[in-house]
Image (tube, rainbow, N blue to C red):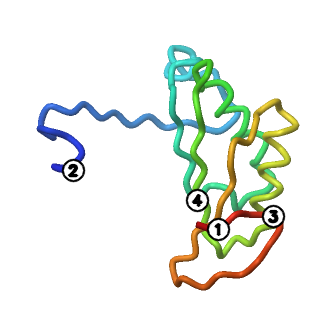
Amino acid sequence: MSSNLPDPSTAQVSIYPHEWGVFTAPFAQENKGAFTRIIAADCFWQKSQHESLARSMAWFLAPGGRVWVVSEPHLGRAVVVGFFETVLALGFEIEVVFERDLMSYIESGVEVRRE
């Protein structure tokens, strides 16, 4: 943290539970459209929750905000593609999709761009 925050002791971090797709809690009511950035990491494995997750992103995201999605390869592309199809159906735009191969193996593919 020292390289990202000048003085970590002055940083304010708060954690609030949220059930995807449920907006009745005080935190959800007070923070509709409040966040310019949402990081969604390793939360796509339940296909049945894709729509609820996407609706929560839409609820909390400020106009012009961005969602950064990170997924583990063990899920397989089909699950992640299903999530992207869900967000497109809900009006999101996909700016860029890429896959990073940490083992430095490069394969050609049409679905993703590797960096």
Dot 1 lies on which element? strand
Mark nearest the camera among 4 and 3 is: 3
Q: Which one is nearer the viewer's eye here, 75 or 37?
A: 37
User: Which mark identifies residue 79?
Assistant: none
What residue sits 15% from the left and 40% below the top?
A: 8
| Residue 81 place in picture, x, y as percent | 80, 58
User: Which mark identifies residue 42?
Assistant: 4
What residue sits 21% from the left and 50% below the top?
A: 1
- Separation of marks 4 and 3 at Cα, in angstroms: 19 Å
Earlier sequence position, callout 4 versus callout 3? 4
Earlier sequence position, callout 4 versus callout 1? 4
Q: Which one is nearer the viewer's eye here, 69 or 103?
A: 103
| Residue 45 left/right relative to 18 | right
Residue type, label 2: Met
Placement of the C terminus among the 4 image quadrants: bottom right
| Residue 61 place in picture, x, y as percent | 60, 26
Residue type, label 4: Asp
Residue 61, placed above or below residue 4: above
Where, by quadrant of the figure, is residue 44 drawn?
bottom right
- Separation of marks 4 and 1 at Cα, in angstroms: 19 Å
What residue sits 70% from the left and 70% below the top?
A: 75
Mark nearest the camera among 4 and 1 is: 1
Q: Residue at the right extreme? A: 89
Residue 52, placed above or below residue 62: below
Dot 2 lies on which element? loop
Mark nearest the camera among 2 and 3 is: 3
The residue at which mark 2 appears reads as 1
Residue type, label 3: Glu
